[in-house]
Image (cartoon, rainbow, N blue to C red):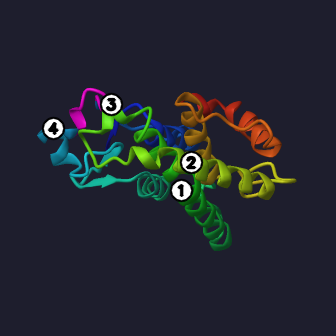
Amino acid sequence: MKLYDSVGPNPKVVRMFMAEAGIEVEAETVDIVGGANRQADYLKVNPTGTTPALALDNGSILAEIMPICEYLSEKDGGTSLFGETPEERAETRMWCRRIDLGILEPLANGFRYSEGLPMFKDRMTTLPEAADGLKGLAQEKISWLDGQMEGKQFVCGDRFSMADILLFCFLEFGGQVGQPLNQANKNIVAWYERVGARPSAAA
């Protein structure tokens, strides 16, 4: 297998997942800042032009972070990062979906349409007029999640999971691009410090 890696929160999710699970694969770095992901060679790998992508041993390509991590989990014989039971796996996927739609998407697009506009304006349709609203939506959902985290160590209670990895990587990215954590969200701030202390957070 080979991982097509790059800067950015999406590839970081996969690297952190692999670090937690003890999985190693060959990696190739794609220069997305320079636009290599929009050139013909990479578009043959992943026609959406996004990273990461995972080339499987049978020659097929997986893209999108959740399928990549689920595949690696199953290929490795299963991992507690998604859950050990049907109930735990369903809970993990529920929280991943909530985090993805409520926080990750508006946070990332808020960046693409503002601070990231010079990089993205010629690569995709951008809506600069929506940037502030999207950032506000992400912060609103983070504050909502803060309430849900009361008394919890991790998103799924005492169980560290893929949901924590997903959220951590994007909140870390937010802090780097002008969307810092609201310190009033004490539960999220404490959670962020716990997850950031894990060795995998440096992946």
Marks 4 and 2: CB-CB under 8 Å?
no
Mark 3, mark 4: which one is toward the viewer? 3
Q: Which residue is mark 1?
A: 100
- Which residue shows up at 59% across the image and 56% down it? 99
Q: Residue furthest left?
A: 40
Q: Is residue 163 left or right of residue 125?
A: right
Amino acid type indicated by mark 4 = Gln
Image x and y of residue 201, in percent: 60, 33
Secondary element at image label 4 = loop
Magenta stretch: give its range. 31-37
- Placement of the N terminus among the 4 image quadrants: top left
Image x and y of residue 67, in percent: 42, 58
- 139 lies above or below 157: above
Disc 1 to disc 2, how far (Cα)? 8 Å
Q: Which residue is mark 3?
A: 118
Q: Nearer the viewer, residue 108 or 39?
A: 108
Mark closest to the chain's N terminus, 3 or 4: 4
Q: Is residue 1 left or right of residue 192?
A: left
Image x and y of residue 4, in percent: 31, 38
Q: Which residue is mark 2?
A: 166
Disc 3 to disc 4, how far (Cα)? 18 Å
Q: Nearer the viewer, residue 130 or 101?
A: 130
Marks 1 and 2: CB-CB under 8 Å?
yes
Mark closest to the chain's N terminus, 4 or 1: 4
